[in-house]
Amino acid sequence: MSDLDVCENKPQETNGDSIGLDESPAKIAKTSPCQRDVARTDYLAWDEYFMAIAFLSAKRSKDPCTQVGACIVNRQNRIVGIGYNGMPTGCSDALFPWGKHNRADKMENKYLYVCHAEMNAILNKNASDVRDCRIYVALFPCNECAKLIIQAGISEVVYMSDKHAHKLSTAAAKRMFQAASVTFWQYVPKNKKIVIDFSEIDWNTMSQMPETPVKNGSS
Ligand SMILES: Nc1ccn([C@H]2C[C@H](O)[C@@H](COP(=O)(O)O)O2)c(=O)n1
Ligand SMILES: [Zn+2]
């Protein structure tokens, strides 16, 4: 049984044995998670969870080179904003460039148009403001996002990669964060991977897995 399976309140048969209240520790150890009375211990820690949300959001990005996600969290560990790097609303991917090397036409460069993940997370906020929140982001913010983060009142930046540490935009961002007392620190994941495996669902207890992917309302 996986953690996602539906638990039923009846003794579960396991290996042909029934499980009674006076079972030996060895037998209790063999019971399925649903039979246990104590909480799981291998759940995601808060930082791991919020950074994973940022990485999941990045999966929506159409940038062929770098997909970035951001997740804003308040002091009660409630998510108040999520975003990823993408073109502005109404600026179709069919009409705006995802390239960055077009020497013939300087206008055909994604950097002129793309909204960064941090910007979208702030603009997507579901709270009146994001003051004193922290933002989880895969890459260290650029100087333009640093301005938005500071002006929005976010007080803490949690980042995974500082691969552009050598860039002027990163140095400028750090200079502004330090002047504005915005703390920043690098999250080092405990686990290299967090797998979301839909096939773990016990489809016998849920509506059958669709034979062919059902297209959702938007692409
Ligand atoms: N903190 C950041 C850094 C970058 N991005 C976005 C902006 C671009 O879409 C992409 C970077 O492209 P590359 O220079 O790797 O071709 O990532 C962001 O949203 N947030
Ligand atoms: Zn940025």
Image: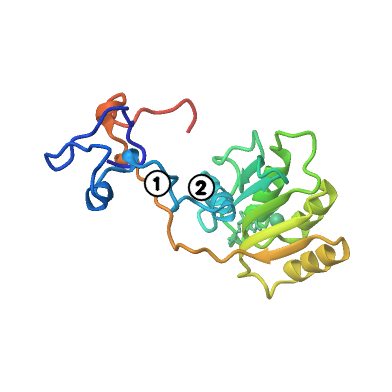
Q: Nearer the viewer, residue 187 or 141?
A: 187
Taking 182 as reference, is 124 above or below it?
Answer: above
Image side of residue 194 versus residue 32, left or right: right
Taking 89 as reference, is 184 above or below it?
Answer: below
Coloration mode = rainbow
Q: Nearer the viewer, mark 2 or mark 1?
A: 1
* Amino acid type, residue under disc 1 in the picture: Ile
Q: How many residues crowd mark 1 within 10 Å: few (<14), some (14–19), many (20+)?
A: few
Taking 53 as reference, is 101 above or below it?
Answer: below
Residue at 81% across, 45% down: 131
Where is residue 121 shown, x and y percent of the image?
67, 44
Q: Nearer the viewer, residue 66 or 125?
A: 125
* Amino acid type, residue under disc 2 in the picture: Leu
Q: CA distance from mark 2 to mark 1?
A: 10 Å
Disc 2 element: helix
Quarter of the image where one finds residue 103:
bottom right
Determine which residue is flagged by label 2.
Answer: 56
Disc 1 element: loop
Q: Of the numbered discs in the image, which one, if any, rests on residue 81?
A: none
Q: How many residues crowd mark 2 within 10 Å: few (<14), some (14–19), many (20+)?
A: some
Residue at far front of view: 22
Where is residue 171 shown, x and y percent of the image?
76, 71
Quarter of the image where one finds residue 92:
top right
Where is residue 199 shown, x and y percent of the image?
29, 40
Which is more N-terminal, label 1 or label 2?
2
Quarter of the image where one finds residue 21:
top left
| Beta carbon of the mark 1 residue lies under 8 A of ligand 1 | no
Report if residue 163 is visible in the image: yes
Image side of residue 204 versus residue 47, left or right: left
The quarter of the image holding the N terminus is: top left
Determine which residue is flagged by label 1.
Answer: 196
Q: Quarter containing ligand 1?
A: bottom right
